[in-house]
């Protein structure tokens, strides 16, 4: 092969790589994450209380979002206090959620969940029950 053939081949490979890089990558995430249908998707990132609290946080957010979509007035207030003493950190979170429901019961269940290890994000798919 002469040098112009090698240059042409390298140029073609660069075009193919650039075209592939522009395609959206799903990374194995479930389809419901992008299209929840008759439900909602909620998530929660890193939680100081660990993975279990991260799951509970995502589920609570999903319930609140589903209730809000069904016309329930949801009010949520979270107070987070962080404290660092001698390099040790402590975090305290108090959360109060109130909802105003008039002759309506909202029932929900977690249809599926997904944990994105790379982002440390826990997702839940909450649907009406």
Image (spheres, rainbow, N blue to C red):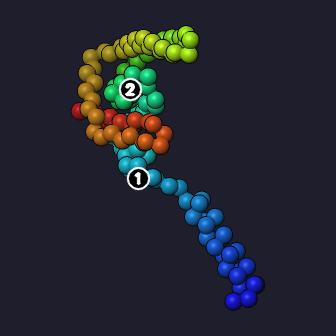
Q: Quadrant of the N terminus?
A: bottom right
- Distance from disc 2 to disc 1, alpha carbons, whole Å, reads 24 Å
Q: Is residue 46 left or right of residue 11?
A: left
Q: Is residue 81 left or right of residue 35?
A: right
Q: Is residue 27 left or right of residue 129?
A: right
The front one of 56 and 109 is: 56
For the point 36% across and 24% down, which residue is it?
A: 53
Q: SS of the residue at dot 1?
A: loop
For the point 61% across and 67% down, which residue is it?
A: 17
Could one spot residue 77 in this view of the protein? no
For the point 38% across and 26% down, which residue is it?
A: 50
Comparing marks 2 and 1, which lies closer to the viewer? Answer: 2
* Among the 4 quarters of the image, the one containing residue 19: bottom right
Check disc 2 and report the residue beneath it: 50
**Mark sitting earlier along the chain (2/1):** 1
Q: Are marks 2 and 1 in contact (CB under 8 Å)?
A: no
Q: SS of the residue at dot 2?
A: loop
Check disc 1 and report the residue beneath it: 28
* Residue 73 x/y as whole percent: 40, 18
């Amino acid at each position: 092969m002469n040098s112009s053939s090698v240059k042409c081949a390298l140029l073609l490979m660069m075009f193919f790589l650039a075209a592939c890089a522009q395609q959206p990558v799903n990374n194995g995430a479930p389809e419901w994450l992008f299209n929840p249908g008759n439900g909602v998707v909620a998530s929660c990132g890193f939680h100081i209380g660990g993975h279990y609290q991260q799951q509970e946080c995502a589920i609570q957010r999903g319930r609140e979002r589903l209730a809000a979509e069904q016309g329930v007035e949801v009010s949520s207030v979270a107070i987070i206090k962080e404290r660092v003493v001698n390099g040790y950190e402590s975090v305290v979170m108090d959360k109060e959620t109130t909802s105003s429901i008039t002759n309506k019961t909202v029932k929900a269940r977690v249809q599926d969940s997904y944990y994105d290890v790379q982002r440390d994000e826990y997702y839940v798919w909450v649907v009406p029950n």
